[in-house]
C-alpha cells in the first residue's frame, strides 16, 4: 500500500488493456486480494469485517481478500448482491468456503469493505443495493472501498448513485480519474495504491514533487526571471499577482499600469502601461488578466501583449477577451476556473481531464483548469492532476496569486507545462501552510515560506 502521488491515471478501458497485456488476470486478482487483506489486517486490529461482493471482478477481489483474511484467523463475513457473473469472480467465490449472506439480510460489522462494483460500473446501482450499502456503511466504524466506492463512474468522477463516505479507498494497479476528480474524490477518504506489478503507461499522472528553479552563485535578478504584470481596472488583483511572482522566486517584477498603492512592496518596479515596455527582451513572462477589466482599454492591452511575442500567463478577465483559436507567436499558459473554461471552450463532453486535454490541443496553450482537482494539460497530451491543496483556497485573490507564481516559473525558463505544474504545487503547499481562513495576501506571503 503506497500513496498515489506520481502514479499514472488510467481510464477503465486503459485498465482493461493493461490487464490484457499482462495476460494473467487470475494472478492479478490474487495479488489484489493479498494487498487488500494485508491492508485490512494492518488497519483494523482484529475487528470483524463484512465484505460486500458484487457480480464482477471487483466482487472477485472481495472473495479472494475474504479467503485470505479467514486463513489468517480474522473474523470475516461476506454478503453478496447476486451470484458472480465473470469466470474469475466465480472461481474466487468457489474457493471461499464460508457462508454468503444475501445483501438485503446482512447485519452490519465494525469494518465494511465495499467490493460491489469497480471500474465496470456502467449505470446507477439498483435501488435495493444502494440502500443496503448506505445502511451498512452508516453502521460501520471504518469503511473501505475496493478500487472505487460503488456508485462512482471511474472515468469522470461523477456519482451515478448516492455514494456513502469512505475512510479508505484502495486503488488497484493504478489511479483512475475518479480518484482525483470531484465529486467522487471527496467521498473516498484516503486513497492508497495497491501495486499489482502492471507497470501501466499513461500520459496522465497524479502530481508529485515538482522541481522548482533554484538560483545558483552566478544568478542575477534577470537570470532568475523577469515578469511583467499588466494591470487594468482593479489594481489590487495585479498587485497580488506581482507580489506573488516575486515571492515565488522571480528576480525582477515589472508592474505595468494602475495606481501605486500606499504600503505596496517597494521591490515591485512600477511603470505606466505602454505596449513598448514589453519590448524589453529580458522579460521572460507576461502575466495578464488579474483585475484587467473587459472594456476596450483591456482589449487593447491584451492585443498588445499577444503581439509582443513574450511567453504568457493569461488569467481572469483576459480569458473572457481571448480568442482561443487565434494563433499566438509565443507559448502561453491559460489558467481558467471552471466558469471561465466553459465560457472560453464551451461546455464539452467528458471528464475534466478529457476537456482540459482537448482545450490544450485546440488552443496550443498549456491549460490549468483550476479547482479542488486542478488539471494541468499540455498541447502534447500530457496531463497532471494536482492533489493536496486546501478547500480554504476558495477565496478572492487566490487565482491572482497562482497567476503571479506561474509567471515566475515561466520566466525562470521552465517549459509551460513544468512551470504550470511547479506553480500549482507551490500554491497548494502554500495554502496548506496557511491553515484555515487565510486571505490571498497571506497566501502570497506563504509562497516564500514554502519555498
Ligand atoms: N483491470 C485490472 O487490471 C484488474 C481489475 N481488478 C478488479 O476488477 C474490477 C473490474 O471488474 P469488472 O470489469 O468485472 O467490473 P465490476 O466493477 O466488477 O462490475 C462489472 C459487473 O457489474 C455489472 N454491473 C455494472 N453496473 C451495474 C449496475 N449498476 N447494477 C448491476 N450490475 C452492474 C456488470 O454487468 P453488466 O453491465 O454486464 O450487466 C458486470 O457483471 C476492478 O475495479 C478491480 O476491482 C482486479 O481484480 C485485478 C486487476
Ligand atoms: K467497490
Image: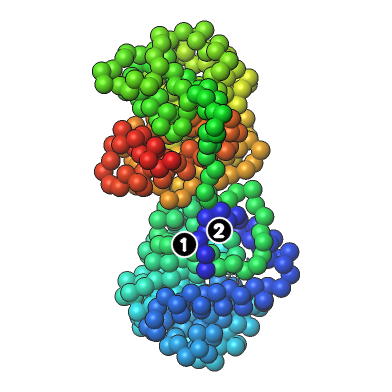
Residue at coordinates 43% horizontally, 62% vertically from top-left? 190
Tell me: 397 left or right of 158: left
Residue closest to the eye, 274 or 80: 274
Instruction: Residue 181 in the image: state x and y as whole percent.
Output: 47, 51
Instruction: Give the SS element for disc 1.
Output: strand
Q: Is residue 354 above or below residue 297?
A: below
Residue 175: mark in rendering: 2
Residue at coordinates 30% horizontally, 47% vertically from top-left? 435
Instruction: Residue 286 in the image: state x and y as whole percent.
Output: 50, 21
Tags 2 and 1 in contact by the CB under 8 Å rule? yes
In the image, is the residue at mark 1 within 8 Å of ligand 2 by its beta carbon? no
Residue 346 in view (yes/no): no
Badge 2: residue crowd in 10 Å (few <14, some 14–19, many ≥20): many
The C terminus appears in which quarter of the rendering? top left
Q: Is residue 343 above or below residue 123?
A: above
Residue situated furthest front in the rendering: 217
Q: Is residue 48 above or below residue 183?
A: below
Residue 203 in view (yes/no): yes
Residue at coordinates 49% horizontally, 16% vertically from top-left? 302
Residue at coordinates 60% horizontally, 87% vertically from top-left? 94
Residue 307, quarter of the rendered image: top right
Badge 1: residue crowd in 10 Å (few <14, some 14–19, many ≥20): many
Q: How many marks?
A: 2
**According to the image, label 1 marks what residue?**
191
Earlier sequence position, callout 2 versus callout 1: 2
Instruction: Give the SS element for disc 2.
Output: loop
Instruction: Residue 38 in the image: state x and y as whole percent.
Output: 51, 78
Residue closest to the eye, 202 or 442: 442
Amino acid at each position: 500500500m503506497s500513496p498515489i502521488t506520481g502514479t499514472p491515471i488510467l481510464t477503465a478501458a486503459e485498465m482493461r488493456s493493461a490487464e490484457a497485456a499482462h495476460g494473467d488476470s487470475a494472478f492479478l486478482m490474487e495479488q489484489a486480494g493479498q494487498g487488500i487483506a494485508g491492508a485490512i489486517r494492518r488497519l483494523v486490529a482484529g475487528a470483524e469485517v463484512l465484505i460486500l461482493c458484487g457480480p464482477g471482478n471487483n466482487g472477485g477481489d472481495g472473495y479472494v481478500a475474504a479467503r485470505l483474511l479467514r486463513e489468517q484467523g480474522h473474523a470475516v463475513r461476506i454478503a453478496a448482491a447476486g451470484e458472480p457473473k465473470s469466470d474469475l469472480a466465480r472461481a474466487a467465490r468457489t474457493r471461499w468456503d464460508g457462508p454468503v449472506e444475501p445483501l438485503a439480510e446482512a447485519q452490519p460489522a465494525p469494518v465494511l469493505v465495499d467490493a460491489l462494483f469497480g471500474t465496470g460500473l456502467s449505470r446507477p446501482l439498483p435501488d435495493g443495493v444502494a440502500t443496503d450499502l448506505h445502511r451498512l456503511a452508516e453502521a460501520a466504524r471504518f469503511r473501505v472501498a475496493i478500487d472505487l466506492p460503488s456508485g462512482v463512474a471511474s472515468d469522470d468522477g461523477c456519482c451515478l448513485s448516492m455514494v456513502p463516505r469512505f475512510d479508505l479507498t484502495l486503488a488497484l494497479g493504478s489511479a483512475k480519474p475518479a480518484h482525483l476528480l470531484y465529486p467522487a474524490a471527496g467521498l473516498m477518504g484516503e486513497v492508497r495504491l495497491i501495486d499489482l506489478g502492471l507497470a501501466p503507461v499513461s500520459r496522465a499522472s497524479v502530481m508529485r514533487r515538482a522541481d522548482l528553479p533554484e538560483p545558483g552563485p552566478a544568478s542575477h535578478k534577470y537570470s532568475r526571471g523577469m515578469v511583467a504584470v499588466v494591470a487594468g481596472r482593479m489594481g489590487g488583483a495585479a498587485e497580488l499577482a506581482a507580489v506573488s511572482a516575486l515571492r515565488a522566486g522571480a528576480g525582477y517584477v515589472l508592474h505595468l499600469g494602475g495606481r501605486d498603492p500606499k504600503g505596496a512592496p517597494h521591490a515591485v518596479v512600477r511603470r505606466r502601461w505602454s505596449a513598448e515596455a514589453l519590448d524589453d527582451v529580458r522579460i521572460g513572462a507576461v502575466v495578464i488578466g488579474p483585475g484587467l477589466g473587459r472594456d476596450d482599454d483591456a482589449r487593447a492591452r491584451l492585443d498588445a501583449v499577444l503581439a509582443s511575442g513574450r511567453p504568457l500567463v493569461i488569467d481572469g478577465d483576459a480569458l473572457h477577451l481571448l480568442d482561443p483559436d487565434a494563433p499566438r507567436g509565443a507559448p502561453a499558459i491559460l489558467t481558467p476556473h471552471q466558469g471561465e473554461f466553459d465560457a472560453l471552450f464551451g461546455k464539452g463532453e467528458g471528464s475534466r481531464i478529457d476537456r482540459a486535454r482537448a482545450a490544450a490541443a485546440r488552443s496550443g496553450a498549456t491549460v490549468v483548469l483550476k479547482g479542488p482537482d486542478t488539471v494541468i494539460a499540455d498541447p502534447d497530451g500530457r496531463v497532471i492532476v494536482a492533489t493536496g491543496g486546501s478547500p480554504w483556497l476558495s477565496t478572492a485573490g487566490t487565482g491572482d496569486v497562482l497567476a503571479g507564481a506561474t509567471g515566475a516559473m515561466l520566466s525562470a525558463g521552465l517549459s509551460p507545462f513544468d512551470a504550470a505544474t511547479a506553480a500549482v504545487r507551490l500554491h497548494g503547499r502554500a495554502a496548506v501552510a496557511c491553515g484555515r481562513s487565510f486571505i490571498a495576501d497571506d497566501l502570497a506571503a506563504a509562497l516564500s515560506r514554502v519555498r
